[in-house]
Image (cartoon, grey):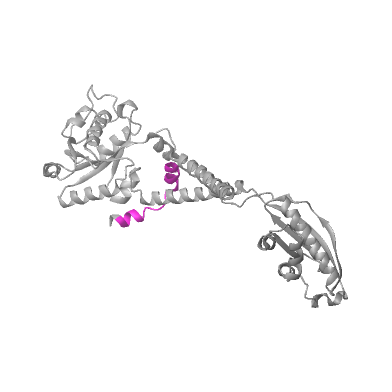
C-alpha cells in the first residue's frame, strides 16, 4: 500500500529542478569530462595508432583508343578494370624495370591506385607512399609503363601524360572539435539519465507533501537547519498546526525516525516556537506568560511533549507512546529515509501506537523559499 502511494505521487517538475539546481555543477563537470574524453580519444587514436606520414602524387593520362567512341563500352580497358590491370605483368613488369633494383613489387602495388572518374578516356593515377621521393619514383615508372602500353597494345593509338602533381603530404582531417562536442553531448545525456534514475530511487523527505501523500499522516511544519541561529521562518505555521491538530491530546511523545539527535534538536526548536512550557509539558494549559509573550505559539494550547529519542527495539519507548495520546515523528530532511519511515510506521502500528503527526527537521531554507516562491 505504501509503495503504491509512492508510485502514484506523480512528477513534481519544480521539485526536480530545484534539487538539480543544487547539483548543477555535476552536470557541468560531466559535460566537460565527456568533451575531454571525446577529444582525447580521437587525438589518441589518430596520433598514436595512425600510420606514419604519407605523401601523395596524382597524374592524369589521356587514353587514345583505337576504335570509335560508340565501342568504348565494349573495351576490356574500362573504368572497373584499371586498378586490377596495374598489378598485371604487362604493366607491372615494365614499371619495376624503371625502379631501383630491390624494390618490392607488393609495395608498388599497394601504393598505386588507378581509376576512371568520369570520361573513360581520362585515367587518374594516384601514388601514395611514406616518402616523397618514393612516391615520385613510382609515379614516374608507372607513367613510363602506361605510355609503353599505349605504344604496344593494339587497342590504343597512344597514352599521353596530361598532368602530374608533385608528391604532397596528406593533410590529416582534424575533427577533434567534432569529437569533443560529441563527447560533451554523450556526457550530458549520461548525467541526465543518471540523475533521472537517482530521482526515481530517491525516497527522501523534502516537503510536507512527501509525508502526507506517501504515509497519510499530517505534517505540523518544517524546521530549517540552524535552529535558533537562523530563526524558524515556518515556526508560526508549526505552532498553528500543532495546536489545532493536537487540540484533544494532553500528552505526546517526540521520537525520531533517523537519529536521537533529531528528537533533541526538534524539542529545543519546539520550545522556541511554542514557549518553554509547551516543550516541558504544559498538560494542556495555555502558553502566554511573560516568558512566552511574543512567541509564535503564545496563547495557544499544546499537549505536554515528552522526548522519546529514536524508535528502535525499545520496549520502553513504545510503552510511553501507548500511555500518551500519540507520537510526534521528527523526520530528517533529504537523507534517503523513505523506507526507514515505512518501517517505523509499520512498527508503531504493530505496537498499537497512535501517530499524531510529523515535523520535518534540518531542512534547507533556500530550497523551501524557492519552492514556495516567498520570503517564508
Q: Quadrant of the N terminus?
A: bottom left
Name the residue at the front extreme: 101
Whole-percent x and y of residue 291? Answer: 23, 22
Look at 60% across and 49% down and name the residue there: 178
Magenta-drawn segment:
3-20
In front: 274, or 104?
A: 104
Whole-percent x and y of residue 206? Answer: 35, 42
Rendered image quadrant of residue 15: top left
Image mark count = 0
Drawn side of residue 183 relative to residue 339, left or right:
right
Q: Is residue 16 magenta?
A: yes
Drawn side of residue 160 relative to residue 303, left or right:
right
Drawn side of residue 70 relative to residue 304, left or right:
right
Look at 45% across and 41% down and name the residue there: 26
Rendered image quadrant of residue 23: top left
In front: 81, or 283?
A: 81
Q: Is residue 19 magenta?
A: yes
Position of 185 relative to 278 (above/below): below
Whole-percent x and y of residue 106? Answer: 66, 63
Position of 318 relative to 289 (above/below): below
Look at 32% across and 57% down and name the residue there: 4
Whole-percent x and y of residue 357? Answer: 25, 43
In front: 346, or 144?
A: 144
Drawn side of residue 27 relative to residue 153, left or right:
left
Q: Quadrant of the C terminus?
A: top left
* Most common secondary structure along the magenta stretch: helix
In front: 188, or 126?
A: 126
Amino acid at each position: 500500500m505504501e509503495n503504491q502511494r509512492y508510485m502514484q505521487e506523480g512528477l513534481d517538475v519544480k521539485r526536480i529542478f530545484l534539487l538539480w539546481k543544487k547539483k548543477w555543477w555535476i552536470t557541468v563537470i560531466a559535460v566537460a569530462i565527456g568533451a575531454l574524453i571525446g577529444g582525447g580519444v580521437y587525438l589518441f587514436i589518430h596520433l598514436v595508432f595512425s600510420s606514419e606520414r604519407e605523401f601523395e602524387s596524382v597524374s592524369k593520362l589521356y587514353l587514345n583508343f583505337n576504335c570509335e567512341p560508340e565501342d568504348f563500352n565494349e573495351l576490356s580497358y574500362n573504368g572497373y578494370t584499371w586498378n586490377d590491370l596495374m598489378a598485371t605483368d604487362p604493366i607491372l613488369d615494365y614499371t619495376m624495370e624503371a625502379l631501383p633494383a630491390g624494390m618490392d613489387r607488393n609495395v608498388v602495388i599497394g601504393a598505386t591506385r588507378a581509376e576512371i572518374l568520369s570520361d573513360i578516356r581520362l585515367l587518374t593515377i594516384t601514388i601514395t607512399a611514406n616518402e616523397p621521393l618514393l612516391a615520385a619514383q613510382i609515379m614516374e615508372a608507372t607513367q613510363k609503363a602506361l605510355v609503353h602500353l599505349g605504344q604496344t597494345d593494339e587497342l590504343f593509338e597512344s597514352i599521353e601524360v596530361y598532368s602530374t602533381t608533385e608528391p604532397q603530404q596528406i593533410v590529416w582531417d582534424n575533427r577533434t572539435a567534432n569529437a569533443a562536442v560529441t563527447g560533451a553531448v554523450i556526457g550530458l545525456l549520461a548525467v541526465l539519465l543518471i540523475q533521472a534514475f537517482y530521482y526515481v530511487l530517491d525516497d527522501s523527505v523534502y516537503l510536507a507533501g512527501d509525508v502526507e501523500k506517501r504515509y497519510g499522516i499530517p505534517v505540523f511544519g518544517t524546521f530549517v537547519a540552524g535552529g535558533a541561529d537562523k530563526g524558524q521562518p515556518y515556526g508560526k505555521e508549526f505552532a498553528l498546526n500543532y495546536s489545532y491538530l493536537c487540540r484533544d491530546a494532553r500528552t505526546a511523545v517526540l521520537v525520531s525516525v533517523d537519529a536521537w539527535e533529531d528528537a533533541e534538536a526538534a524539542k529545543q526548536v519546539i520550545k522556541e516556537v511554542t514557549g518553554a512550557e509547551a516543550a516541558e509539558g504544559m498538560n494542556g494549559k495555555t502558553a502566554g506568560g511573560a516568558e512566552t509573550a511574543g512567541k509564535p505559539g503564545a496563547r495557544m494550547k499544546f499537549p505536554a511533549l515528552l522526548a522519546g529519542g529514536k524508535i528502535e527495539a525499545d520496549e520502553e519507548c513504545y510503552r510511553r507512546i501507548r500511555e500518551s495520546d500519540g507520537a510526534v515523528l521528527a523526520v530528517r530532511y533529504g537523507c534517503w529515509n523513505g523506507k526507514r519511515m515505512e518501517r517505523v510506521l509499520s512498527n508503531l502500528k504493530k505496537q498499537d501506537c497512535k501517530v499524531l503527526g510529523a515535523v520535518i527537521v534540518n531542512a534547507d531554507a533556500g530550497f523551501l523559499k524557492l519552492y514556495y516562491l516567498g520570503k517564508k
